[in-house]
Image (cartoon, rainbow, N blue to C red):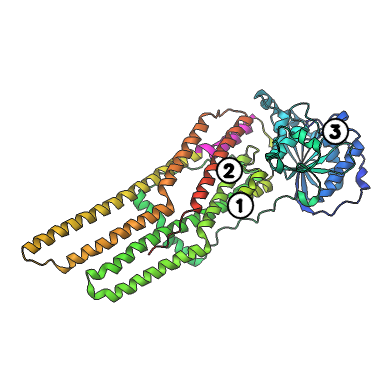
Amino acid sequence: MGFGAARPRPGGVAPPWRERKPREAHVAVEGLRVAFAGHIRPEDLGDPVAVARQIAEAFALLDIHGGVLLTGLAEGADALALSCWRTLGLGEVHAVLPYLPDALSPEATAGVARVTWLDGRASEADGRSAHLAQARWLLEDADLLVAVWSGEEARGAGGTADAVRVALQRGVDVLWVKPGETGGPRRISPGPLETEGGLLDLVEQVRLDRPPLVFPARGADLQPPQEPAPPEPPAVGPWERRLDRTLWRAFAIYRRLIGGSPTPMREPSPPPECLASQTGFQILSRAYEAFDARAARLAAIHRSQQVFQALMMILAVAVGASPAIWPDIKIYAVLTELTLALVTFLVWLGAVRSQRGRRWGEARRTAEQLRLERAAWALGLSAQGRRDIAASAAAGVARAWRRRAGAPDGVFDRERVATWGGWALDDLIHGQIAYHRVQGALNHRLAHRGHAIENAVFWALVALLSAFAMAYVLAARAHLALPHWIGGAVLLAGAVTPAFGAASLALDSSLAFSDQARRSDSLRRSLEAIAEQVDPAASLDALQRAARAAIRLRISHEENWGDEAAHRHVVRGG
């Protein structure tokens, strides 16, 4: 029972599906990734010819074109499904085998497009079921599971019932073929399990054989998520390039002036050559780099806009109050202040209409999700399951790219696990610890020095007003008149200082340096706690557990950041 590692029987079974019953209208699906699980024991499987016909009906219901069959190449139901898949010409086959010795038997995988070998002995030494690990691997990027299942509990870990549990836990629909039944395949939906008793009493719920858990299978209900459009690089024309060199560098200049010289950032570790050469890794890397470039540019524009508008606020007040010193320039000051106000308003209006802050947040979350998916891919994981893609648009996009990448292939022996796992954990944990240590310190300096400058300006104004009051009293007693420009300068300072304070508050509200510093410190400490528990020489299962913990932590922080960013006000200024 389950995803066993036994060999498929040569030749399979004569295709009884040539004479099929009329079936319902269905939707043609391109590139559907179908995981398969089924019984091995003859007493569970029943009549192989009848089961082969049922499997063919399930595949025909999907009307697959150019799909991928994810299978363990076991005897019994797996062999029947493989023979049916090849006879119907539905697409390529990706086999996932649970034990490394299978890599020495090329006849076992003859005609299979891609093969992944797992180190089942290492899993068993770690107290894990090799076949359960195999089932989880197959279902990481599957669109659905076709299961030939009697509906009974598994007789051992990693059986067909466990495969169904894993699928539903990950939000993957199950197309259920029950041996001996003639009513056609049925769909087991993962949705109701959150409120109908969960996964522990799955078999008892299935035995009820009625909604909301079990439905009649329809092809329209079993479609994969929509493929994402290829990410486009940021559209930068000549005018935008000039802005990038001038106006949109405002935040970088502000950060350098206030935050000081940046601490050298730790360069990310390059992926091992054997990992970088994998097609799936390249797909995820290109998507991540495109979204990361887009997010970086939108961040520079959004943050620079906030700095620009704050500076325009101070400058406009200074220009408007300057006639207190030079009365003759009043009309010019008014016209200049009006121009500054209109320019600032146009910059603000462009940001609001283009929803640049929201687009930056979405691009940033998508890039981060893709970075997590890329690192998780090296360990055979998905950062987000199908159950999670409704949480945000970014999760859906990243999940779709993970599905397009497929699963890694090749031999996951100790050397590969150590090499790929070391890179993945460095990207997920150690690299992020170094990154947030630098970012936390920088944001702390920006927040602290910004408040220090604000306080210094305030107390300078207090000192100036006190000095003017004392000079005015002394001059009155001496029957002297203070020069006009001195009073004008005091009025100018009295106007500019509140504007400076308002601009500082606006920057603190929109850029949230203090919140970002606290967030980086919290995330760094949590990642350090995970890093302390990771053994560099750990098994694949242990590395996967550490990666899952880091991914969950990162996603929770990312969601909190997104909620906070969504409620930040875009300051208009003026």
Inspect this view and state whether residue 327 appears.
yes
- Above or below residue 295? Residue 476 is below
Amino acid type indicated by mark 1: Ala
Badge 3 element = loop
Q: Check residue 420 for magenta coloring.
A: yes
Q: Position of residue 273 (x, y in %)?
A: 60, 41
Query: Is 194 part of what is drawn in magenta?
Result: no
Q: Which residue is mark 3?
A: 76
Res. 283 visible in picture: no
Amino acid under label 3? Gly
Residue of label 1: 393
Mark earlier in primary sequence (1, 2): 2
Q: Amino acid at mark 2?
A: Leu
Q: How many marks?
A: 3
Residue at screen point 91% across, 51% down? 22
Of label 3 and label 2, which has the lower sequence position?
Answer: 3
Q: Position of residue 14 (x, y in %)?
A: 92, 40
Which residue in the protein does label 2 denote?
372
Between the residue at mark 1 and the residue at mark 2, the CA separation in whole angstroms equals 15 Å
- In the rendered image, the vertical position of residue 492 relative to residue 282, given as above or below: below
Q: Quadrant of residue 97?
A: top right
- Give the quadrant of the N terminus: top right
